[in-house]
Amino acid sequence: VTLNPEIGLDLRSFGFVAGLPVYRVSSPQRNTTGIGDAYVSAFLRRPARLYEVASGFTLGLPTGSMEQGLGAGRVSVDINGTVRRHFETLRPFVGVGYTNSTFNNVGYQRPFISNGNAFYTSAGFDYRIGRRLTAGVGGFGLLAIGTQTVISQMSNMQSMGGPGSGMGGGPGMINGMHDGLPA
């Protein structure tokens, strides 16, 4: 179970958010509760005719216990960019990014943290239903570069994988923002 309280400021072209996840892990090999890695994120958005271009930067601080599977044990960074096209109610988007630690994100809850360089991409669309409701669908992919160290939340074991170790996943530390763009 993950609880991720955030506080932030979202202006028309700039946003800032800080968060501190709290995890409750219960498995046959591990039973723990604690805080994860604290993070701060900033993003910029600019309209460009019918498009919206955004970039984001997230810095993760090693506040969670690596031994308990709650943190990366190091400073983490995530840099990403997104382009979104505006139609009346449909907004397709595509994004790319780089991270040095892969964590949970809004779209996919992982039972592990992966330390290692990775590039990722995401794409999909949001459909605006009324004034305050948006539904969306998206996909993502992750390409691990070099050696990856996997920190399991479910067991007391760590593993290392070489290049192309087949790790799946999505953006490293993208939070309540959809690739730097609120839905």
Image (cartoon, grey):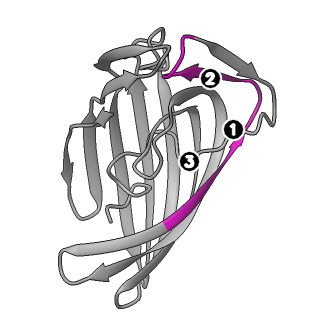
Asked if residue 37 shows in the view, the reply is no
Distance from the alpha carbon under mark 3 to that under mark 1: 10 Å
| Residue 128: image location, x then y, percent | 31, 80
On whether residue 45 falls in the magenta region, the answer is no
The residue tagged 3 is 170
Q: Amino acid at mark 3?
A: Gly
Q: Residue at x 29, y 62 (%)?
A: 13
Q: Tell me which corner region of the image, top left, top right, bottom left or bottom right, holds residue 90.
A: bottom left
The residue tagged 2 is 150
86 in relation to 112, above or below: below
Whether residues under marks 3 and 1 lie with C-beta atoms below 8 angstroms apart, the answer is no
Q: Residue at x 50, y 31 (%)?
A: 111
* Magenta-highlighted residues: 138-156
Whether residues under marks 1 and 2 lie with C-beta atoms below 8 angstroms apart, the answer is yes
Where residue 167 is drawn, which disc sits there? Answer: 1
Main SS class of the magenta portion in the image: strand
Find numbered disc 2 in the image and state the secondary structure of the residue it sits on: strand
Mark 1 nearby-residue class (10 Å; few <14, some 14–19, many ≥20): some
148 in relation to 52, above or below: above
Find numbered disc 3 in the image and state the secondary structure of the residue it sits on: loop
